[in-house]
Image (cartoon, grey):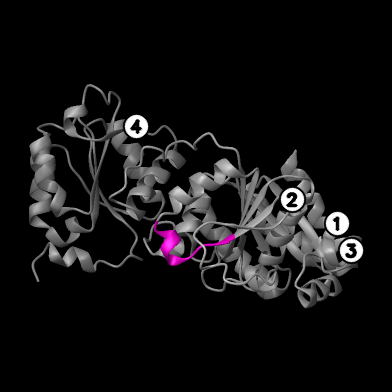
Amino acid sequence: MDAWSWCAHVSDLELPTVITAIANPEIESFVAGTLFAQGWSVIFRAIDSDALEGFIKGSPESACAAIVIFAPDLSGITRERLDALTPKVKQLIGFSNNITQDASLGELHAIPITTTDLISLVRGYIRAPMLRQNTQLSRQVRRSQVLAVGSAGSYTGCTTLAINIAMELSIVEKATLLIDANFRAPSIAALLAVRNLQSEAGWRSIAPALSIAEISQEQAASIDTFMDQATQSFDHIIIDLGSISGLSNRLTDRRWTSTMTTWSCDQGDELMVIARPDVLGLHRLEQVTSLIQKTSIRSALSFTLNMRSQGRKGSEEEVKFLAITTPLHPRNVRMISRDARAITAAQAQKSTLIEVNERSGLRKSIAAIASELVR
């Protein structure tokens, strides 16, 4: 196997490696420092084109897995030299303050101003290196407000909350799309007694103002197109992500199972992390928050403690939950009390909470969340 064929065997789970080729020390320091802080390896910082080519030639295995981030100010850089490097590295990304003037070097991007803009753009290239990333730095003007619901651990009630938030939005006449993106264990169709949902390419209407979709492997390949259509068609989109453990790796790997998590973190309006209050649930929450602290995401962050106990025990659970989540300065922190009777009834009838018992405390708590989203 030659050195360049070896590139195809680099693990999709491996954190990206980066080579910078930028003469401006402030810009180079911003790029290298930001990516290094995300846990990515900055393996070489070229001071001119000769140094860049020499490193790549001398370290083929390291170079072929690397993303080269360059700027037109690098001494000796030309389109011909960039074209010669293209097959020898994982990806070339160019930044310029004057894209029109430097257009001869190929497709360039405006130099990102913020950390999240830089991370979002580079992650986009990692996920889909053959796609243009012109829309990565800003969310498109769209109709929808997008809430992604992710679980810190297992059995947190993530899917139940997603289903019922979507239902509550629909009954106040907000066109709502509920997306099952829990690739490990899709369950929305089963809980609502909807057949053959995954076989459909788009979404299916199941109630006035409420539609659902389940993302398959085939749809994941064109998720940007699907979500562009959805965000222009609905007032609200609720995405059930399932577990978001291992968030950092999922935002940079290229497996189809990570597509909706990455889209939600880069393009969603809010990422709601759900946790349960027992010892293991709070332990999983600590693991997830630790990852989030080290990971730049563009979506606003919120936390919800589900299945909170009553009385003094519930107050103690709340204190522990706030101690874990407050340092991340979330947009919202919510508490929902345990209501096993309402959940059991809804699952038995394969219905939503408002259809089973609209006066239940759980239903009222979820209706309050939906009201916040409508404001």
The residue indicated by pointer 3 is 360
Q: Nearer the viewer, residue 144 or 175?
A: 175
Distance from disc 4 to disc 3, alpha carbons, whole Å, reads: 52 Å
The residue indicated by pointer 4 is 111
Specify few, some or many for label 4: CA neighbours under 10 Å numbering under 14, 14-19, or 20 or more. some
Residue 2, position in %: x, y? 8, 67
Distance from disc 2 to disc 4, alpha carbons, whole Å, reads: 41 Å
Q: Is residue 127 above or below residue 372?
A: below
| Figure quadrant of residue 93 | top left
Residue 41, position in %: x, y? 30, 55
> Over which residues does the magenta segment extend?
213-221
Q: Residue at x 67, y 68 (%)?
A: 282
The residue indicated by pointer 1 is 364
Q: Of tags 2 and 4, which is closer to the observer?
A: 2
Q: Is residue 139 magenta?
A: no
Rendered-image quadrant of the C terminus: top right
Q: Is residue 288 visible?
A: yes
Residue 247, position in %: x, y? 49, 61
Amino acid at pointer 4: Ile
Mark 3 touching mark 1, by CB under 8 A? Answer: yes
Q: Residue at x 33, y 49 (%)?
A: 125
Amino acid at pointer 3: Ser
Residue 8, position in %: x, y? 21, 65
Q: Could you tell whether 260 is left or right of 278 in the image?
A: left
Q: Residue at x 90, y 66 (%)?
A: 311
Distance from disc 2 to disc 1, alpha carbons, whole Å, reads: 15 Å
The residue indicated by pointer 2 is 170
Q: Could you tell whether 170 is left or right of 81 in the image?
A: right
Q: Of tags 2 and 1, which is closer to the observer?
A: 2
